[in-house]
Structure formats: C-alpha cells, structure tokens
Amino acid sequence: MCSSLSTPYPWDSLDKSILQRSADLIEDFSPQAIRKIVFENCKEYLGFSFIASQNVSIVKHTLLGVDGATIIAKFRKYPKMQDDIFHKFRGMARLIQVEKGILPVILIFPEKRETTIEHESIHLCQWLNNKPYQLTLTERKAIFHQNARIVIENVLRTSPEQALDLLIRLTCYKVWMELEAHYFTNAQDTLTLTQRSSRPFETLKGGIPLFGIDKHIPNAIDKCIKEFSRFCNELESQVEWVRDLVTKSGSETLYEALWWRKEDDEVEMMFGPITDEELEDEGSEDAILRRLSNEEDIKRNLSYEGIEDEDEGDD
C-alpha cells in the first residue's frame, strides 16, 4: 500500500474554504433543481425505484460552522427500492458530482437518532478532505457519488490486482471512518457499532468471489487478511484514542477486537440477545443486525456507503 495513503487525518481538520465553495455552489441552485439532483442520484446509484416528493423535505445545513455547506434530505417515509425491499437506514451521506463541483448531501430516514445528522456530517468532512488516507480524494468522489460496487467493477475490467487493492483500501477506510464517526458522536460501544457499520470481514471474504477476483488472484483472501491486519496495527500505533478503545475492549489488537464483535453478532443472529440489559444497551431489538453474509448482503454493503447503523428491513 502506498505510504502516502497511510496517515489518518482528523475529521474536523477539513479546510473550511472547501465547505465555503460547497455553500456557494448550493446557493447557485434553486430548491427545485437541488431536489431533482438528489432524487436522480438516489435512483441511479442507490436503487430507489420511487420517491414521493411530498414525503421528502430538503433544507440547507451548517457544516463545521459554515452556513449552508450541505444539503439534508429528510424522508418522512422510506423510499421503495428497485428490488422491492425496504432497508431501514437511519442516515446516509452522499457526494453528488455536478458540473461545477460537489454537492455534499445527507439523507435522513424516519428511524434517525438524535446523533444521526452529526454522524453523517462527520462522514462528509472525512470525504471532502483533500488529504489522502486509504483512498485518494478522486477515489472518494467516485465511490461516494456512485457506489463502490460500480467503481470496483470498472477497475476490475482492466486490472484484477488494482481492483483487489481498491477493495482492501475501501474496507480499511470504512473501518476508520466508522470508528471516528461513532467515537465522536459519543457511542456507548464504538467498536461494536463500527464492526456492524463497516463489516470488514464479511466484505473482504464475500467481495472477492462476488467480483470474481479469486479467479485472477488465487491467494486474494490471504492478501486481504494480511493487509487488513497491517492496517489495524498501523491505526493503533497512530491514533491514541483507538489504542484506548482496544485496551478497554480486553483484546490485544484492533483486528482481534473487531473479529470478536463479529463473532458475538453471529451468535446473536442464531440465538438472540443474551440478556435484556444488553438488548437495552443497543437501543432496541430492531437495531440488532440479524443477517448472515451472502451475495446480496455484500452488494448492499458495498453500495450504501456512509450508512449509520443500517437495520434489517421488515417489509
């Protein structure tokens, strides 16, 4: 992995002039034009098959103290997906490329928490920062404007090695961005929520056969394990609060801490929550992910970046 991509930066280190340019760009559009842009992006890249305009309110929002630097689209009802499945997302951040720049957008859904807007705002600040970490700014713009699955498939057509590298780096980046967003929105269990939001082990193990990378690179999974373990070790050494989280978790490494949280979730999927107290700590039973890794799950995990606490759809 390129050394220039290996140093994390704080989410609030974003140059505010970048946000001011976003605010100026947003000001250039009419409310009707913004609504059209947001809806078209959701339909093309997120699979929303139908969006009732009367069910969505769109407002400007302050980001890092810059007025009107982002757009919030609040959904009163969940939009219908092209596969007729409703996914109970709390929030989702998007970068929408337009002719003159980038529109930072936050989608907010009915199951939102008090911290959902703050959580998604952190993601926007992470993505808009022109400092490279795991992903370059160009890669972030492509991935979070479209979705990761489309970008990886495009790279795969020319180079399986580059596609594998991108899959690994994207997975590492998602772990970092969820760690930071959950930590700075006062999550009770940052490591558990990070594992559930980013799902690194499922994404790497499932993504390789999904894209057919293993047909070109037989030892792809071994490479993934090695690189993800290296990333976890580097992150611990670079960020003090990550080391503190690992120490408090009782695990020896970040990799191990995330792995055991994945194992705990899989036990819960099969046998349910262990105690009522643990269930209350999660907020509600609906907040617990109850799904096993499969092809459609991996596709959704790669497609919907910046999701805070995705829950299983029930209708």
Image (cartoon, rainbow, N blue to C red):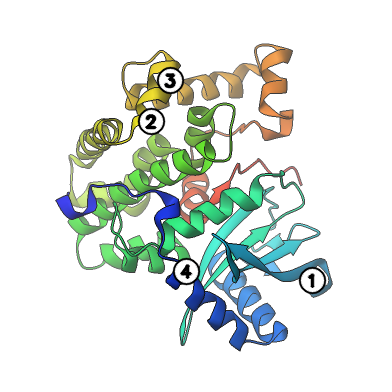
Whether residue 146 can be seen here: no
Q: How far apart are marks 4 and 3 (CA)?
A: 32 Å
Q: Position of residue 292 (x, y in %)?
A: 53, 33
Q: Residue 242 carries which label?
A: 2
| Residue named by callout 1 | 52
Q: Distance between the residues labelled 3 and 2?
A: 16 Å
Q: Position of residue 200 (x, y in %)?
A: 40, 38
> Do labels 4 and 3 touch, CB within 8 Å?
no
Classify residue 81 by image quadrant: bottom right
The residue depicted at 59 percent of the width and 56 percent of the height is: 92
Q: Within 10 angstroms of label 2, few (less than 14), some, or many (20 or more) residues?
A: many
| Residue named by callout 3 | 260
* N-term mark: 4 or 1: 1
Q: Position of residue 10 (x, y in %)?
A: 39, 48
Q: How far apart are marks 1 and 3 (CA)?
A: 42 Å
Q: Distance between the residues labelled 1 and 2?
A: 42 Å
When the figure is inspected, residue 37 is found, relative to residue 74, above or below; the finding is: below
Q: How far apart are marks 4 and 1 (CA)?
A: 22 Å
- Three-letter amino acid code of the residue under disc 2: Val
| Residue named by callout 4 | 145
* N-term mark: 4 or 3: 4
- Three-letter amino acid code of the residue under disc 1: Ala
Q: Within 10 angstroms of label 3, few (less than 14), some, or many (20 or more) residues?
A: some
Q: Is 304 on the left-hand or right-hand side of 33?
A: left
Q: Is 129 on the left-hand or right-hand side of 230?
A: right
- Three-letter amino acid code of the residue under disc 3: Trp
Whether residue 210 can be seen here: yes
When the figure is inspected, residue 288 is found, relative to residue 314, above or below; the finding is: above
Q: Distance between the residues labelled 2 and 4?
A: 29 Å
- Three-letter amino acid code of the residue under disc 4: His
Q: Within 10 angstroms of label 4, few (less than 14), some, or many (20 or more) residues?
A: many
